[in-house]
Amino acid sequence: MKIFYKTRATATGGRSGHTKLDDGSLGFDLVSFQEQDKQGVNPEQLFAMGYAACFDSALALTAQQMKLPITASQTSAQVGIGMKADGSYNLDVDLYVEVSGIDEAQAQKLVETTHTVCPYSNAIQGNAEARLHVTVA
């Protein structure tokens, strides 16, 4: 694989600690999803933000490659965490994608194709369930 970009982040204190990019450009105090009364973010929120941004970018690239004239798009990623029957933890993902400028069938095909292109989708493939929800605006 040809690597285009790498970044590095370091966390201390786990889900109740702090995480930051090693270049110092961004950092967050962390709280567990069970600590909703405390200030900070949890890893699932950070993953959802990254997944939504990555998928929406991959959608624009895929639309261009498929020669689909989309005029706008918006992607929301809803990320949950749960326990599997064997006691291990796993993520659960719903992607809500809104596309303008094409019909429903084209939008569905575009989102399904994007799901095979997006690095986040590829990273969780076979590991976490991701459901696709498509809306045409």
Image: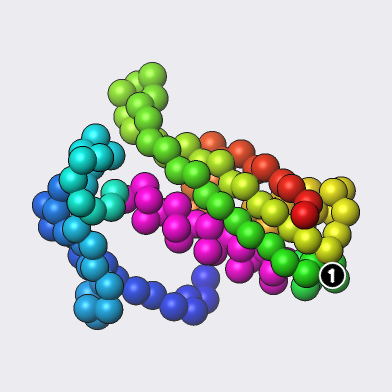
Which amino acid lies under the numbered mark 1 shown in the image of this protein?
Answer: Pro
Residue 81's place in the image compared with 63, above or below, is above
Residue 106's place in the image compared with 54, above or below, is above
Magenta span of residues: 43-62
Residue to which mark 1 is pinned = 69
Total marks shown come to 1
Asked whether 119 or 59 is in front, the reply is: 59
Secondary structure type for disc 1: loop
Residue 2's place in the image compared with 47, above or below, is below
- In percent of width and height, residue 71 lies at 78, 69
Task: Judge from the rendering whether residue 12 lies leftward or rightward of residue 26; answer left or right.
Answer: left
- In percent of width and height, residue 88 lies at 32, 29
Please name the residue shown 37% across and 56% down the image. 46
Q: Is residue 31 magenta?
A: no
Task: Judge from the rendering whether residue 10 lies leftward or rightward of residue 46; answer left or right.
Answer: left
Residue 82's place in the image compared with 103, above or below, is above
Please name the residue shown 22% across and 78% down the image. 24
Query: Residue 72's image quarter?
Result: bottom right
Residue 39 appears in the rendering: yes
Q: Name, please, the residue furthest toward the left.
A: 13
Asked whether 101 or 56 is in front, the reply is: 101
Please name the residue shown 38% across and 36% down the image. 81
Task: Judge from the rendering whether residue 38 lies leftward or rightward of residue 109; answer left or right.
Answer: left
- In percent of width and height, residue 82 lies at 37, 30
Task: Judge from the rendering whether residue 46 lies leftward or rightward of residue 54; answer left or right.
Answer: left
- In percent of width and height, residue 66 lies at 82, 67
Q: Is residue 45 magenta?
A: yes
Residue 109 appears in the rendering: no
- Main SS type for the magenta part? helix
